[in-house]
Amino acid sequence: MSDSLLPAGPNTPNPIRRRSQLPDSEVALAALATTVAKAWQASELPELLWLTKADLAAQAEAFARHRDAADAAGDARTPQSKRLKALDQLLNAGLRYVKGYLAEAHDDETAYYGEFGIEKAHQKYGLPVGRPERVKAVTKLLAALKSHGFDKKKYGTAHWQPLLTEYQQLVEQTTETTGQRSGKVSSKSQGKKQVRKALQALIHHLKANYPDTFEAQLRAFGFQKESYGG
């Protein structure tokens, strides 16, 4: 029987879980990079061939800035998303009454659904799920309400026009915000990789230059693993 299949005995040592020299949290990583960059600038430790002290300081500053920008863009999108969900519910609720108007006026009301932007999906008739497509559908619905003489009813033009105006504006804003946030998240992710690579290199640099006292040097530079959290 292979040794790997034998059950662990009482004398089998437990695997050692080493805490990473770098934090997982982006907030903690940004703070560490800033601290280390300042310590290196004030230290006699020489620069690396591919990384200068100024480079690390610039990378730390850029990463912190991009991280904050990505978070801010995400926060800005949240209220827009909540309002769009609420408007989706209002649009769906109002559509039931428009279907009722058609059912009263025509024997085969589904034959007129296309004029009102209503389509069939998953065995149900409704407005498109995609929001840009939904904007187009409600625009068709508004025109059809007038052409079929439903525009003066309770769920006629006065009901749908304000919903469409707000919905269209929010869809446009959300599309723009999402694009901006995607770019900021991409910049943050790239910056995170660069910062981690630089800090890992600096850890090895300290170990190579201070073989007997590198642990104290690491702490002096800010690499204090117990402060990183989980």
Image (cartoon, helix red, strand yellow):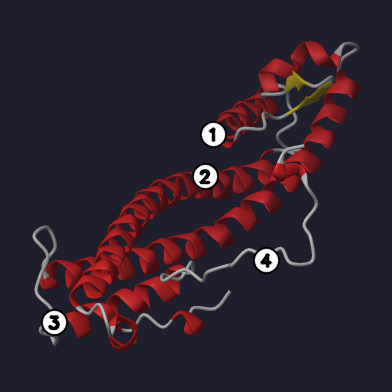
Quarter of the picture containing the N terminus is top right
Choose top left, top right, bottom left or bottom right for residue 30.
Answer: bottom left
Q: Which element is circle 4 on?
A: loop
Determine the CA span between mark 1 and mark 4: 57 Å
Q: As rendered, which of 19 and 208 lies closer to the eye?
A: 208
Of the image marks 1 and 3, the number of the one nearer the N terminus: 3
The residue wearing badge 2 is 171
Q: Which mark is residue 14?
A: 4
Q: x, y percentage for residue 105?
A: 86, 20
Of the image marks 4 and 2, the number of the one nearer the N terminus: 4
Residue count near mark 2 (Cα–Cα under 10 Å), binned few <14, some 14–19, many ≥20: some
Q: Residue at x 30, y 74 (%)?
A: 33
Q: x, y percentage for residue 152?
A: 73, 38
Q: Residue at x 40, y 46 (%)?
A: 179
Q: x, y percentage for residue 52?
A: 10, 67
Q: Which element is circle 2 on?
A: helix
Of the image marks 3 and 4, the number of the one nearer the N terminus: 4
In the rendered structure, which amino acid carries the disc numbered 3? Answer: Gln
Camera-nearest label, 3 or 4: 4
Camera-nearest label, 4 or 2: 4
Q: Are marks 4 and 2 in contact (CB under 8 Å)?
A: no
Residue count near mark 3 (Cα–Cα under 10 Å), binned few <14, some 14–19, many ≥20: some
Q: Are marks 1 and 2 in contact (CB under 8 Å)?
A: yes
The residue wearing badge 1 is 132
